[in-house]
Image (cartoon, coloured by chain):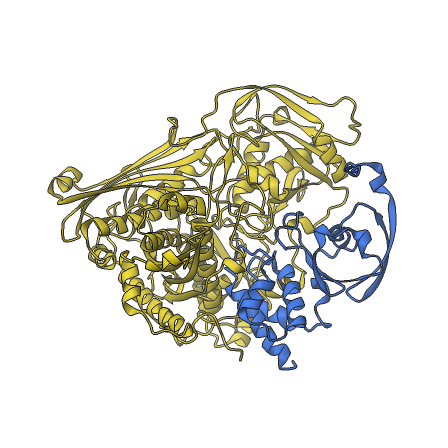
Amino acid sequence: MATDLIPLGDPSLRQKVRLELVVNEERRDLVIDGYKSLLELLREELQLTGTKHGCELGECGACAVLLDGQLVLSCLVAAVECDGRSVQTVEGMQNGPTLHPLQSCFADAGAAQCGYCTPGFLLAAKELLERKPDATRAEIAEALSGQLCRCTGYLQIFEAVEAAAAQLRGGR
Amino acid sequence: MPKKSGRDGGARRAKSRSGELRTVGHNVARAEGVEKVTGAARYIDDLVFDDMLYGATLRSTVPAGRIVAVEKDPQFDWTGFVFVDHRDITAPGRNAVAMITEDQPFLAVDRVRHQAEPIWLVAHADRARLAAGLARITVRYEKEKAQLDFETATEVLKEIAIKRGDLDAAFARADVVVEGTYRTGAQEQLYIETNGVIAQPGAGDHADGITVHGSMQCPYYVVRALRVLLGLPEAKVRVVQTTTGGGFGGKEEYPSVLAGHAALLARKAGKPVKMVYERHEDLIATTKRHPSIITHRTAMKKDGTILGIDIDLRLDGGAYVTLSPVVLSRAAIHATGPYRADAVRIRGRVMMTHTPPNGAFRGFGAPQSQFAAEVHMDRIAAELGIEPIALRRKNLFNTGDVTATGQKLHDSVAAHEVLDRALARHAIATKAAAKARGKTAAKGAVKGAVKGATKNGAAANGAPLRGTGLALFFHGSGFTGGGEVKLASKAGIALTKDGVQLLVGSTEIGQGTRTMHAQIVAESLGIPYDMIDTADPDTARVPDSGPTVASRTCMVVGRILQRAAEKLRAQLGDYDDGKSFKKRARKLLEARGTVEVIEEYERPGDIVWNDTTYEGDAYGAYAWGANIADIEIDPISYQARCTHFTAVIDIGKAIHPILAEGQIEGGTLQGIGWALYEDVVMRDGKMHNASLTNYIIPTTLDTPPITVEIVEHPYKNGPFGAKGVGECPIDGPAAAIVNAIRAATGKRLDAVPATPERIMKALV
């Protein structure tokens, strides 16, 4: 027996839900519409518009963020699933005024052209380097394969990740 | 410093011939780099205006038909909705998208001519309500016969002819005539940020004006479209480009349509209206690269000399003219490839079909026509039994040669040099790859593969089929023929107390416009790069610098800025550094209040074009390219994969080497995508695979190592010798890959995309 699906636009989805989560190391206590995705929560409730949408179907990777340190596509995560959890977005990568090595290397190496896919790439790369500080080119390509970029041809992105990895290993 | 792995280190580009330059030729910090890596950059959907509504479009679901009725579900609660249809466009406004012609309506009146054609516009403050409402409006049609296949279409939207020399005599003298027909498919630009705008009533002091913010390449195209639609003078229309998430031509003409729609809703509602397309809508409704069918007949001497070239070229225009006439003209002018012939005839036509209009896409017709030319060169080589490289060398343009339009190439011709460099770089890469595999470099095999004569016996045991293919190409920078004169682009510089501000209507869409223009001005003024600021691309502030298209933003607009800088420098008198510049600037500002130098395009005296006969100097300068593709084909799945790619491009001067390489790498991969993966499947006149799950663009895992080399053959009328770079890189990859597939399999494909299905059909 198929479960009865609630039609989109059904008032029950408008029920307000209370959520407590940590976003970029800051505690947030929110009351939101129950149907909202994590992407909508970030962009519309918290005005963290650095996280982008490119398809809202989990195909392009532009909305990738870290949820408890794991890379997720925020358009496919229901906001209610994030209760009690910790989210990191591109806005949380800097340390005060200092850019994360991935950010400065992306800017310097030409890895951000139009910039729309950049936040997703940065978080996917961060997740990889935390797991594998000495990732090879092949491992970088594999880890970033869910992120689409149409500008760069990816090579300057690979170079940026490698340069950042070297800086991070060097203890900078 | 981290080692640069993957791409060859060392001499990746020609040595700079301008060692004394302080800013140009250096990798300065990208102007908007930090905001793009911190999430601070604001794209259109990141903006929210007070009391803003969301807009959506009711679109046709048949390819051709008469609209009988549009009906709203009476059971639905329509409170708070705003509706617009064609009757809301009133004189002096016109229901016509101002482009080359005015054949395309903003909103269908009584007929639709393609799927996804806009019929009604709807707005509401709540997006979920809006979507629910849109689904409750139905359109009833009387269906009409639709012409969906451009190869059998008969209605011609535009025809041009290029003729040079005595073609009959050339064919009479020929030892051999080689004929071939080639096809290319549609391609979606696939910018990661979809099309989007926000329109708001009022412009400056004009309450009856209109202001549009949005993602776009050409703010002044949008101004013109809004003026025609709303019947407003220029002063009452303001357009502001927001940070734009990629364009590739897809945001050249289409934003005019979307801006018009949002403007109509905003005026009716009296509130700001945001319209941002979802991916599916963007895919089914917006322009694509024109599909093509191109037939070549070539009169050849046995020794490999081309005597005459006869080309018939047809493009699928879709239902309306849009920019097709100029796409056709660029396609035709580039259709011979970079080869001379004393007799040339090119007939080009754009065919009308009942499909969404095709339009601008990086390369603008030249990738299609040069795909045909370069695959045909390999066919000629095979039929004459001549080595493909030798055949090309014999016919390649040299300085002093004459093109199809009768243009004598007197400046910056690098066709041979890019070929030589590509062969050299490919040989190095092949040797390195062989070494990495622990084998000795198979010199003969590489040469043989380029010859197109490889027989790969390994296929029988399930090993991949391997092949190497070559393509040579060129790309005219700037508008075709008299286009730049008609544009009369303006750009300028304003003095500020801390330096200067650039006043330029060219847009930053990822390619590095802001950085590159600032470098040109910093170098010309002799002041540090960080003293250059650029005004926001707001038509209330910046002049019309012409559209940001056609590989013209560096060569043409950059040159105008350079001239403005030279004039400003003369006005300031002597200064030796940034500090003394500032002193003089402040003095001058005190005396005059404001100091602005606005310059206009000046036609170089030696460029002559006749638009009636299609003769003369089609472009001020050409970029030159050579590609070598190494591919392998899985003998079971028939999936072809590029294993290494060599791209050598002459761009005159790399103003910012990293940005220029980024253009070459990105354009090359987009070309590889077109060649192997990107297949727009149409059913009943509508894109059937309108999602990123089944319209496949290359991912990181599809990206081969790409060896890039920039050649710098300076062009005397370009800033610091620079020509265009944006489009040239996409002209070659498809032909190089299809030629490599032929080398690997011995079979002709003659079409892209080279999908596994197509390769299987050719092989089995």
Q: Nearer the viewer, residue B60 or B636?
A: B636
- Which residue lies at the image location 25% right of the left edge and 52% below the top edge? B339
Chain in blue on the image? A
Total numbered labels placed on residues in the image: 0
**In the visual, does B651 lie left or right of B88?**
left
Q: Nearer the viewer, residue B13 or B50?
A: B13
Q: Is residue B270 visible?
A: no
* Residue B118 location, quadrant: top right
Up/down of A59 relative to B221, above or below: below
Q: Quadrant of the C terminus of chain B?
A: top left
Up/down of B324 relative to B113, above or below: below
- Which residue lies at the image location 58% right of the left edge and 35% below the top edge? B232
**In the visual, does B280 lie left or right of B174?**
right
- Which residue lies at the image location 73% right of the left edge and 31% below the top edge? B133
Task: List x then y, in percent, for residue B264.
Answer: 64, 33
Chain in yellow on the image? B
Task: List x then y, in percent, for residue B615.
Answer: 26, 43
Q: Nearer the viewer, residue B747 or A49?
A: B747
Task: List x then y, in percent, for residue B675.
Answer: 42, 50
Task: List x then y, in percent, for residue B119.
Answer: 61, 28
- Which residue lies at the image location 56% right of the left edge and 36% below the top edge? B227
**In the visual, does B711 lie left or right of A21?**
left
**In the visual, does B524 lie left or right of B17?**
right
| Most distant residue in the front direction | B461
